[in-house]
Image: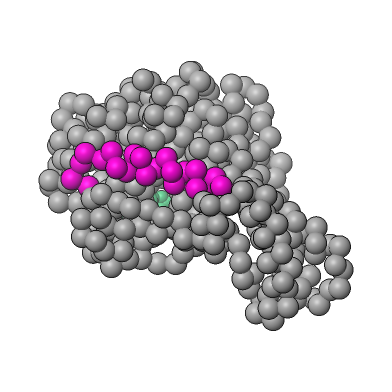
Amino acid sequence: MTAQVIHRLHLEAFRNYDTLNLALNSTPVILVGENGAGKTNILEAVSLLSPGRGLRRAAIAELHNTHIPPEKPWSAFFEAVGKQGDVNIGMGRDPESTPDKERRLLRIDGKTIKGQTALAEHVNVIWLTPDMDRLLAESAGERRRFADRLAFALDSSHGTRINRYEEAMRSRARLLRDGTTDDAWLNALEASMAQDGIAIAAARNEWMHHIRTHLADDPSPFPAVQVAMNGFLEKYLESHAALDAESLFKTMLKQNRAQDAASGITTTGTHRSDLEVHHVSKNMPAHLCSTGEQKALLISLVLAQARLLRAIHQSTPLILLDDITAHLDEMRRDALAQQLLALGGQAWLSGTDDSFFTAFKQKAQFLHINNGHVTTP
Ligand SMILES: Nc1ncnc2c1ncn2[C@@H]1O[C@H](COP(=O)(O)OP(=O)(O)OP(=O)(O)O)[C@@H](O)[C@H]1O
Ligand SMILES: [Mg+2]
């Protein structure tokens, strides 16, 4: 069993960092500092190792240190051990991008790479941030995106399909709103939505199948969790062939045209699905659980995902836990440390006080952060 490890992290003009150069070993990384020191910024940089916009979903220009002239664009460089062994990954704002079309440059082992999906061949990054505290209580959209990010780790086409599906859906909605009679164009968009929609639902079901195995496997004080994807197509696919599901979805889209035109909402599809989370021992849906209980449910999910990826890739993913100790009592803090140490990867944790992390003892590297500067005790 191996683990994904960042051995060197170099940031330039990134958020509140001017220049940051960190040499790291393979044990967990604990970032300690007061509010506003720059802990989340470091975790955000690491989260950019997965395709997308990172844990804050920030725009590329937003990552640039506002105190540094724009001519010196931000960059992040990682020397890492990935799923396929040693890898160097560099990224930054493309100096040729314009404010209306910001682009991220990506270089893997010195080669410029188009798109970002290639990142997923090297590393998996899972994160939990305070922004996600309300994830289980609020709108389905955020929960669905969370589930899709986890499903993406098993199927690197998942993100591309979702983007294409949503684009076709927006085009269809525009045509319907404008009262078009271009039947061929609508048919083509609906055929594309049906094809991608079924693949999206199938990838979610596949992930669901795997994560359930690893949720059942949880030995910790973090609660046992039941998950389900509440979506028409996901449910239908459980007992029907993909081709049947695809033609049914296409027929429904066609039948719903008038209704969708009137409401401005696409009535059916994978964009309506929701991740249902249930606290097993309390027999309680997650949204009725307390804040601390919801956090514990999310930790159970994240740890299960880490075990799942470890089993599939024979390599422990990077886990980023921002401000994780905030809602955890001492027993749970210690249990989390034991779980992360047992997983054996380079987990990254942040908090405002060393004392929250005493359970890691000598088995982690502590970095003290102060106003964009890092010292090791
Ligand atoms: N683009 C930017 N340029 C310069 N500074 C920035 C930029 N974006 C954010 N910052 C600043 O970086 C600082 C550190 O932010 P960060 O979120 O990393 O703090 P933190 O250590 O996680 O604090 P907390 O404990 O409150 O979560 C903040 O003061 C923030 O205003
Ligand atoms: Mg923070």
The quarter of the displayed image where residue 307 is located: top left
Residue 206 part of the magenta segment: yes
Q: How would you classify the magenta stretch by its main secondary structure?
A: helix
Vertical relation: 64 (above or below) 274: above
Image quadrant where one finds the N terminus:
top left
* Closer-to-camera residue (68/361): 361
Choose top left, top right, bottom left or bottom right for residue 370.
top left
Estimate the x, y position of residue 98 in percent, counting from the top left: 70, 49
Q: Residue furthest top?
A: 86
Tell me the quarter of the image containing the C terminus.
top left
Residue 168 position, x and y percent, is: 72, 58
- Asked whether 232 falls inside the magenta stretch, the response is no
Image location (x, y in percent) of residue 134:
35, 62
Q: Position of residue 363 (x, y in %)?
A: 21, 26
- Magenta residues, start to end: 202-222
* Relative horizontal placement of residue 310, taking residue 207 as reference (left or right): left
| 99 shown above or below 104 | below
- Is residue 57 visible from the viewing direction of this image? no
Instruction: Please report the residue visible at 55 percent of the width from the left and 29 percent of the height from the top.
Output: 121
